[in-house]
Image (cartoon, grey):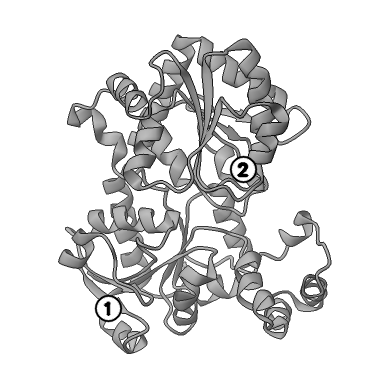
Amino acid sequence: MRLAFFSPVNPVESGISDYSESLLRALAPRCTVDLFVDGYRPSDPWITENLRIVDCRRGDARGLLAGYDGVLYQMGGTPGHHKYMYDIMLEHPGVVMLHDLIYQGFFGDLWLKTGRPDLFIAEMRRSYGAAGEEVARNLAAGRQVPFETIKKYPMNKRMIDSALGVAVHSRSALRQVVEVRPQVRCQLIPHHDFGWSAWAQQGYDPAAANLSAKQKLSIAPGTKVLACFGFIVATKRPDVVLRAYARLRQDIPDSCLIFVGEEKYRVSEYLRFLELDTSVRITGYTTSEEFRTYLEAADVCINLRYPSQGETSGAVLRMLALGKPVIVTNHAWFAELPDSACAKVDADRYEEDLLYGFCKALLTDADYRLAMGRNAHEYAQRHCALDMVAGQYLDFLAECAKGGDR
């Protein structure tokens, strides 16, 4: 198979960049892959040395696509990273991996924030009729629209309608895609584990890595480390995490909390209010190597997410793959993870209490912590191994190349 692969890659700072770089390495031995990017040179030497790079700003990318057996679009929600492929996918249908399910933010940034509300309103009218147009006009006027209403108008219809096939990472996303277009070829392809779950065959020792990582980060060996990964935004529930940790700190004083990622939410101010300045660390942006060091240093990981845009989490897959116990929100894709492999809290009035309880139990009960970590690793290895996921992509691309709906 000769495959045209559309995706951001590093130096574009995106979880999809990391996702696609790992996937490309797994696909390359099995097919001929050309990478289509948007006006930059990939920073990974393996990519530039082993793949043909097509810059969509410098040549006629559209004119090349007829020569491929399959076209794969890795579609996310950031216009600066994905607009180039959105424009092309409508003209040249292929397989679209929807990394999100709700794209109102994509089109809002693309059109509302750039002074083109007419395009936003027209898209909503085209997809959802008069009801969609009314919501679009309210958003264009700057009025608050409840998330429960926004969920009814995810603005993904044209992407789904134009595709030869749609891939998603969760059962809930699959159901919603089929509701939009019942006859579409839609395949659940798990989010891969970046190849990290194969550590047992590589002589990797998680306990030794934990001690070594703490030493590198100047964390005392006996310190119990809680860590949250990714951009610090309101949907990651940082206020809930901090309130729960303020209580936990009273019970387990030899603990610390680390936010590994850029601060997009006023966490620093909240820290001072809760008097947690000395026990909470905010790293800012980290390299891939630094990210892994912090993950290895963590004893328990927290990855809350509510409301969800239908996305999955590469950070959580890495946690599971390394056998880390993780606490997630019981919502969307996260709710589909096995109960034995993670702890789940509902985003309701008991959220803080449940988070506090799970953190305390996991940090104080080594058997519980280790058992959850083993289950997490086993799940990632059995269901999300990188090579297995790459094979599922190729099978689905071949199926869709035959043409027609199901």
Local crowd size for mark 1, using a 10 Å CA cut-off: few (<14), some (14–19), many (≥20): some
Please name the residue shown 27% across and 78% down the image: 68
Local crowd size for mark 2, using a 10 Å CA cut-off: few (<14), some (14–19), many (≥20): many
Mark 1 vs mark 2, foreground winner is 2
Alpha carbon separation for disc pair 1 and 2: 40 Å
Position of residue 347 measured from the top left corner of the image (x, y, whole percent): 71, 36
Position of residue 343 measured from the top left corner of the image (x, y, whole percent): 56, 26
Q: Which amino acid type is shown beneath numbered disc 2?
A: Lys
Please name the residue shown 41% across and 46% down the image: 286
Please name the residue shown 35% across and 58% down the image: 20
Position of residue 174 measured from the top left corner of the image (x, y, whole percent): 54, 55
Q: Pick the residue in front: 116 or 284.
A: 284
Q: Is residue 8 above or below residue 338?
A: below
Give the quarter of the image for residue 397. Answer: bottom left
User: Element under label 1?
Assistant: loop
| Residue 240 seen in the figure | no
| Residue 61 seen in the figure | yes
Mark 1, residue position: 68
Please name the residue shown 66% across and 71% down the image: 108
Q: Is residue 95 above or below residue 147?
A: below
Mark 2, residue position: 236
Q: Which amino acid type is shown beneath numbered disc 1?
A: Tyr
Q: Pick the residue in front: 388 or 270.
A: 270
Q: Is residue 169 above or below residue 140?
A: above
